[in-house]
Structures are given as C-alpha cells and as structure tokens.
Image (spheres, rainbow, N blue to C red):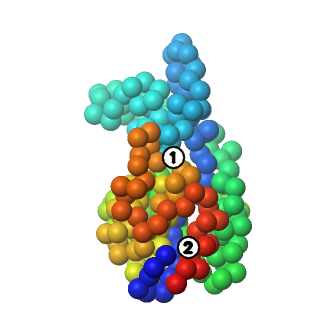
C-alpha cells in the first residue's frame, strides 16, 4: 500500500470484517418468520445483507423497508432475538493471528462499527480478542454513524494517533467513504458481506483483501 505517512494504527469495522455474525443475525430474523407460520429461509439468503443489520435482515425476511409503519416494532423484536444469540458469534479465520501480529509489531488497533453499544458492549466483552483493542467505537458512541467520519476521529483520539496515520478496514462502501472523509487509508475486506450487488472495485478503496491475513502483506509494502 503506497503511503505518504507512516501507519501507526489499524482500525476495523466489526461485522463482516472481524466477526462472522451472519448466522446469528440471520437466525434472529428467520425465527420471526417461523413464529408467523412462514417457511424458514436458508442462511445463504441472509448472509449477503448481514452488514446492513436489522434493515438488511428484515428486508430479506419480510421484504420490508425502514420507512414502513410496522418497521420499528419488528426491528425491536429482531433486536431481542439477536441479543439471545449474539454471544455465539465467532471471529473469522485468521483474525486472531492478524491481531497478534499487529500487537507484536507495536501497532495499536481498534474497532469502529455502526452496531449499537447495546450489542457491541456485551459482544466485545465476551470475546477475549477485544481485550487488547485500544478503541471500540459503536454506532451511538458519537452523535454520528458511518459514513460520517466522526466515529473514526473518535477512535483515533482514543488511540492517541492522528487520523492520517491510521488504516481503516471494512466490508461496506460506507466504511470506505468514512475512512476517506477522515483522511485515513482504506482497505476493503472483500471476504465480508458487502451486500448482494456490491462491486468492491467501485468503492475507491486504497486496497482490498480477500482474507484477514492479507492485510499484513499490505502493511509491509513501502
């Protein structure tokens, strides 16, 4: 990755970048279908939209959009279902080794997610990996969520690093937009969810990776 300033920290999106929460998110929405006497849908239907949270899961399950009058109560029902399942979420293969290597290189790391602290807090506290994170910024930590850059600025402040010395890794176009707006280098996690019709080549990322450990190779480039 060509850089004009030395990389001093690495920030990550959460769902679809560090953790594979699609099975739990999909199950939470699918339970709502089953409870209403509808046929269960396979995980493959839910996985591409897992990065969109409740909006994506309820869209798959019921074809509903956030502007529908009954979306808010359905969203809260989904949240309750997800809370009962979320601690079964696992990190992607290679993530633990990636984080260990970053720490060995003296690079602090953190998380910037649009997931509410209602979920981010219990989830990250329950997973030993996140005990070494220097910053965990949720969607409601600041008054703004991505693609606004303020959550990334907050993470940089928590790490004590200037934004231009950070790399932000994420699996959604909003992540790349937020990273650019914050003046950070951006890396698209093409192994993540990305949405059903996503074309990572259009995201204007500085680089893309197809597995977590590929990031280490990028960071070694002059």
Point out the frontmost of discs 1 and 2.
2
Closest to the observer: 13 or 214?
A: 214
Residue 37 appears in the rendering: yes
Compared with residue 37, is residue 90 higher up or lower down, i.e. above or below?
Answer: below
Residue 17 as seen in the image, left or right of residue 52: right
Q: Residues within 10 Å of mark 2 (few under 14, many from 20)?
A: some
Q: Residue 138, percent across and down? A: 46, 59
Q: Quadrant of residue 209?
A: bottom right
Label for residue 114? none
Give the number of callouts: 2
Q: Residue 164, percent across and down? A: 40, 81
N-term-proximal mark, 1 vs 2: 1
In 3D space, how far apart are the residues under numbered discs 1 and 2 (Cα atoms)?
A: 21 Å
Look at 38% across and 67% down and name the residue there: 179
Look at 70% across and 64% down and name the residue there: 96
Residue that label 2 marks: 218
Q: Residue 198, percent across and down? A: 41, 46
SS state under label 2: helix
Residue 166 as seen in the image, left or right of residue 212: left
Q: Residue 39, percent across and down? A: 55, 16
Residue that label 1 marks: 193
Q: Given the current orientation, which residue lies at the most extreme top position?
A: 37
Look at 40% across and 56% down and name the residue there: 201
SS state under label 1: loop
Q: Residues within 10 Å of mark 1 (few under 14, many from 20)?
A: many
């Amino acid at each position: 990755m060509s850089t004009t300033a030395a990389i001093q920290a690495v920030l990550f999106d959460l769902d679809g970048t560090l953790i594979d929460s699609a099975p739990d998110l999909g199950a939470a929405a699918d339970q709502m279908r089953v409870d209403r006497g509808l046929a269960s849908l396979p995980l493959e239907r839910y996985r591409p939209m897992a990065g969109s949270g409740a909006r994506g899961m309820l869209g798959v399950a019921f074809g509903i959009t956030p502007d529908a009058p009954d979306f808010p109560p359905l969203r809260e029902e989904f949240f309750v279902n997800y809370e009962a399942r979320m601690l079964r979420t696992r990190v992607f293969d290679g993530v633990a080794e990636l984080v260990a290597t970053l720490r060995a290189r003296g690079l602090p790391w953190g998380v910037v997610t649009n997931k509410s602290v209602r979920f981010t807090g219990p989830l990250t506290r329950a997973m030993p990996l996140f005990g070494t994170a220097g910053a965990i910024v949720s969607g409601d930590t600041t008054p703004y969520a991505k693609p606004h850059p303020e959550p990334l600025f907050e993470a940089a402040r928590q790490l004590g690093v200037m934004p231009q010395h950070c790399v932000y890794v994420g699996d959604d176009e909003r992540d790349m937009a937020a990273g650019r707006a914050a003046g950070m280098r951006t890396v698209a996690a093409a192994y993540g969810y990305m949405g059903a019709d996503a074309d990572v080549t259009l995201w204007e990322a500085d680089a893309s990776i197809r597995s977590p450990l590929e990031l280490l190779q990028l960071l070694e480039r002059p």
